[in-house]
Amino acid sequence: MDEPLDCLIIGGGPAGLTAAIYLARFHLDILVVDAGKSRAAWIPCSHNHAGFPDGINGKELLERMRKQAQKYGAKVVKDRVSKLERDEDTGLFTATWGSGKATARSVLMATGVTNRRPMMDEELHDEALANGRIRYCPICDGFEVTDKKIGVIGSDSHGVAEAVFIRTFTADVTLIAPHAALKLTPEDQQTMKEAGIKCVDGPAEGVAFDDKSIVVDTAEGHHAFDSIYPALGSDTHTQLAEMLGARLNEQCCLVVDSHQRTTVEGLYAAGDVVIGLDQISHAMGEGGVAATTIRNDLAKQKPLLRESAK
């Protein structure tokens, strides 16, 4: 029987790949299984990632991180883990994907989340996203829409909060209901009025875009914007951790301690699956913390003493 991995990392986004770099440089035997769905790959050009004053494409950033991890011995497999089990007697984890399978002493969940998309053709959505007509993170790229005409597709307090946040970058913001009439509390209505944010009833559907604008079809007719922000929430990828009985919080994210340990011994988590902040820098920080914790916890089980090179 093959020796179990020191750590299996599920997810190859910023959190998982940062952890892979750390763990590989700790001389540990690790494997990254990545479904290739990291939201970082959506980013046409990130201008708030430290160290890249002219910006960097999300796919390029991930490729650089993969190469860096592989340089130090990390193995990367492109596939989706479908099953995760833990042997209560040995404490070992077994993960299954496609035609592959691996056993590991520890597992890091870096599976992230999926943004809920607005109603529109998938191909149109992806093209508009690549061209900056659709944006998902005003924290990351609000600066790029300074003084532009912006539409926010959302409702309730979440949509209001995003519209108000974007209002700090531009005076021209419209909140559009995704499915039917906007249903805002009196307090939210007052907030919208004071901020000068226009409100439009839905349903909202992206129907066309060009190099200058994106058109949204609503119950009140067509509206053209420089960019739109879907504020529809997201779905956290916690299914594998739930198979092991890991606890979730009210936001359906994995509960971890200050060192990224979940409620299941040997199972760790980092990135948006822990807190959906949507920030590469934050995910990378958690990846580094998780990797160091994993290394130290493994050393308590079995001393990680390197043999003489002679």
Image (cartoon, rainbow, N blue to C red):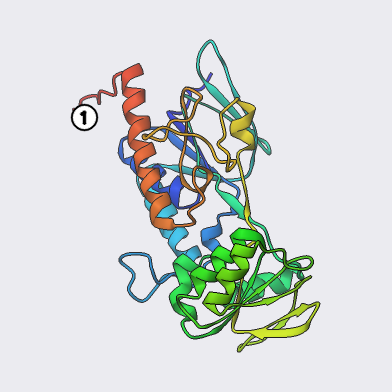
User: Where in the figure is residue 46, as x and y percent of width and height?
Assistant: 44, 69
Residue that protrudes farthest toward the top in the picture: 89
Residue that protrudes farthest toward the bottom in the picture: 212
Q: Is residue 57 visible?
A: no
Q: For this rendering, which residue is in front, 130 or 30? A: 130
Would residue 297 be found to the left or right of residue 168 on screen? left
For the C terminus, the quadrant is top left
| Category of crowding for the residue at label 1, using alpha-carbon neighbours closer than 10 angstroms: few (below 14), some (14–19), many (at least 20) | few
User: Where in the figure is residue 175, as x and y percent of width and height?
Assistant: 64, 73
Q: For this rendering, which residue is in front, 61 or 129? A: 129
Would residue 109 be found to the left or right of residue 220 on screen? left
Q: Is residue 107 visible?
A: yes
**Residue sitting at x 36%, y 76%:** 54
The quarter of the picture where residue 95 lies is top right
The quarter of the picture where residue 102 lies is top right
**Residue sitting at x 53%, y 44%:** 273
Query: Does residue 210 sit above or below 142 in this rendering?
Result: below
For the N terminus, the quadrant is top right
**Residue sitting at x 43%, y 76%:** 143
Q: How many marks?
A: 1
Query: Does residue 25 sit above or below 199 in this rendering?
Result: above
**In the rendered image, which residue does mark 1 sit on?**
309
**Which secondary structure, mark 1?**
loop
Residue type pointed to by label 1: Ala
Q: For this rendering, which residue is in front, 4 or 57? A: 57
Query: Does residue 183 sit above or below 290 in this rendering?
Result: below
The quarter of the picture where residue 261 lies is top left
Query: Does residue 168 sit above or below 268 in this rendering?
Result: below
**Residue sitting at x 39%, y 37%:** 290
User: Where in the figure is residue 94, as x and y percent of width and height?
Assistant: 58, 25
User: Where in the figure is residue 14, as x and y percent of width and height?
Assistant: 45, 52
